[in-house]
Every structure is written in C-alpha cells, then in structure tokens.
C-alpha cells in the first residue's frame, strides 16, 4: 500500500509539472515562433536586451534579422526578437470598427430617446385635447 501511494504521488507531481509548467511554456514558444514568422521589413521591434529598432532585413536562411537603430545597423538572431510593436495602420484598422460601433450605438440611443420624446409629446397632446373637450 505504501509503494502504491508513493508511485501515485510521483505521477501526480509529473502531471502537475506538465500542466502548469511545460504546457504553458510550449504554448508561449509556439506563439513566439508565429510572431517571428510574420516579421517583415519596416516593423518596429524590441530585442530581448530591450534594444529598439526597425527591421531592415530578414535573412531566413541564416535566421538573422538586421535592425536599423538610428542609422546603426545591427545583426541579431531571429530568436533575439522579444516583441513586435503594432503598426499605426494595424491600430487604426482595429480602432475603426470599434469607433463605428460606438457611433451606431450612440445614434440608436438618440433615435430611441427622440422616439420616446415624440411618444410623450403625443400623450401630452392627447391629454390636453381630452381636458379641453371635457370643459
């Protein structure tokens, strides 16, 4: 019985390590590889050493990237790229649908409030007409 609990404890420990350490790390590596596959000339990037620059050239054969850092060209391994800064065009493209949705929502609320004002005005006019008929 003691050996069974020891083996079970070890199995539970390995399962814990897998689901809380190994699996998330693999997912993160996969996301990083996808990000690196999308890198192109003109992208603003930051390296793992926090050096910021603009991609000048990507060499897929050697797996290197040349960065333009204020006129100084530096060559790094692709794996040294920590993140790609979003372009202004990408930000504008994602912000435009949100802005359009906000305008549409705002317009709908104005239409609803105008309709309720018309309804209340009509009700007031009907009650005023009923009062004048009663006199």
Image: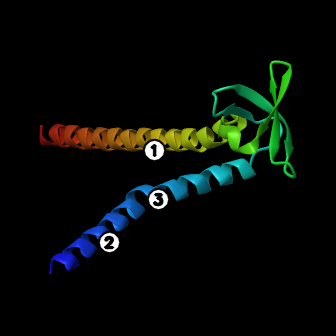
Q: Secondary structure at mark 3?
A: helix
Q: Residue at x 69, y 39 (%)?
A: 80
Above or below, 2 against 17 in this view is below
Q: Which mark is residue 11?
A: 2
Mark whose residue sits in front, 1 or 3 = 3
Q: Quadrant of residue 84?
A: top right
Residue 82 position within the rendered picture, expressed as x and y whole percent measured from the top left = 63, 38
104 or 130, nearer to the observer: 104
Residue furthest to the front: 3
> What residue is pinned by disc 3?
22
**Residue drawn 42% across and 55% down?**
21
The mark that comes first in sequence, 2 or 1, is: 2
User: Which residue in the protein does label 1 denote?
Assistant: 108
Reply above or below: 53 against 116.
above
Nearer the observer, 103 or 126: 103
Q: CA distance from mark 1 to mark 3?
A: 49 Å
Could you tell me which quadrant the C terminus lies in? Answer: top left
Asked if disc 2 and disc 3 are in contact, CB closer than 8 Å, the reply is: no
Q: Earlier in the sequence, mark 2 or mark 3?
A: 2
Q: Are marks 2 and 1 in contact (CB under 8 Å)?
A: no
**In x, y percent, where is residue 70?**
81, 18
Seen at 49% across and 40% down, the residue is: 107
Mark 2 packing: few (<14 Cα in 10 Å), some, or many (20+)?
few
């Amino acid at each position: 019985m003691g050996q069974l609990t020891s083996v079970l404890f070890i199995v539970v420990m390995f399962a814990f390590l897998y689901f809380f350490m190994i699996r998330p790390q693999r997912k993160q590596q996969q996301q990083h590889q996808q990000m690196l596959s999308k890198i192109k000339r003109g992208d603003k990037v930051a390296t793992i050493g926090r050096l910021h620059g603009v991609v000048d050239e990507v060499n897929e054969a050697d797996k290197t990237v040349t960065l333009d850092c204020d006129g100084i060209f530096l060559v790094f391994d692709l794996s040294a790229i920590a993140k790609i800064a979003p372009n202004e065009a990408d930000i504008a493209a994602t912000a435009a649908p949100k802005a359009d949705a906000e305008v549409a929502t705002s317009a709908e609320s104005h239409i609803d409030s105008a309709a309720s004002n018309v309804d209340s005005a009509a009700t007031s006019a009907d009650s005023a007409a009923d009062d004048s008929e009663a006199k």
